[in-house]
Image: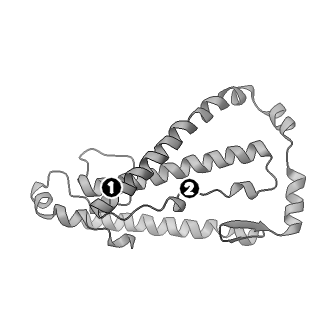
Amino acid sequence: MDDKLAEILEGIRKLEHKLILELQKGEEEFFYTVQRKRVSFEQEVKSQHRLLIKRIRHYLKDAAILNILTAPVIWSCLFPAVFMDMVMSFYQAICFPIYGIPKVNRKDYIVFDRHYLSYLNGLEKMNCVYCGYFNGLIGYVQEIAARTEQYWCPIKHARKIRFVHGRYSKFFSYGDGESYRKNIESVRREFDDLK
């Protein structure tokens, strides 16, 4: 069963990689390049984008009133998110070297690039930065948690779960106490796939 799970998770990883490559085809289609994290559009495309910008006053006038009223609720999540970012970064900086766990590279998860889009107004750019940060943060924190779980409690769940992270295939089957006791230390060190 573990081999089958590993095979399925490897298939998912390959599909995710294929998806990323497919998404990056937009560089050719929409005439932009990415160099050193900076996105550049051809000048003609930038000019066309500027024609599409929706001024903030029109943007707010056309917005649903409930969207405007709930915006402060959405933005109130920023403070706990920043706090979680700091705590998790501090946690892995202190603990991962002690445990021998490779650190999660924050910049692989939290990406800011939507502000290069000239067809977005300032409010839309600010919202896009927020969403990119928050969703990237969740991925970053999830990977830190997955590596921690592999070190401290690498046991699969008995109950069905909706999502499994990329480290899950290395975990022991639920109820397999003998393998757990015999092999826990090797599983705790099994991060070669990250190098």
Q: Quadrant of the N terminus?
A: bottom left
Vertical side of 126 occupied by 68: above or below: above
* Three-letter amino acid code of the residue under disc 1: Cys
- Tell me if residue 164 can be seen: no
Q: Secondary structure at mark 2?
A: loop
Q: CA distance from mark 1 to mark 2?
A: 21 Å
- Point out which mark residue 110 bears: 2
In front: 158, or 61?
Answer: 61
In front: 7, or 170?
Answer: 170
Question: Disc 1, disc 2: CB below 8 Å?
Answer: no
Earlier in the chain: of badge 1 and badge 2, it is: 1
Where's residue 190, x and y in %? 27, 68
Where's residue 104, x and y in %? 43, 61
- Point out which mark residue 12 bears: none
Q: Residue at position x 73%, y 54% from top? A: 115
Q: Secondary structure at mark 1?
A: helix
- Tell me if residue 104 can be seen: yes
Where's residue 167, x and y in %? 34, 60
- Point out which mark residue 95 bears: 1
* Camera-side mark, 1 or 2: 1
Q: Quadrant of the C terminus?
A: bottom left
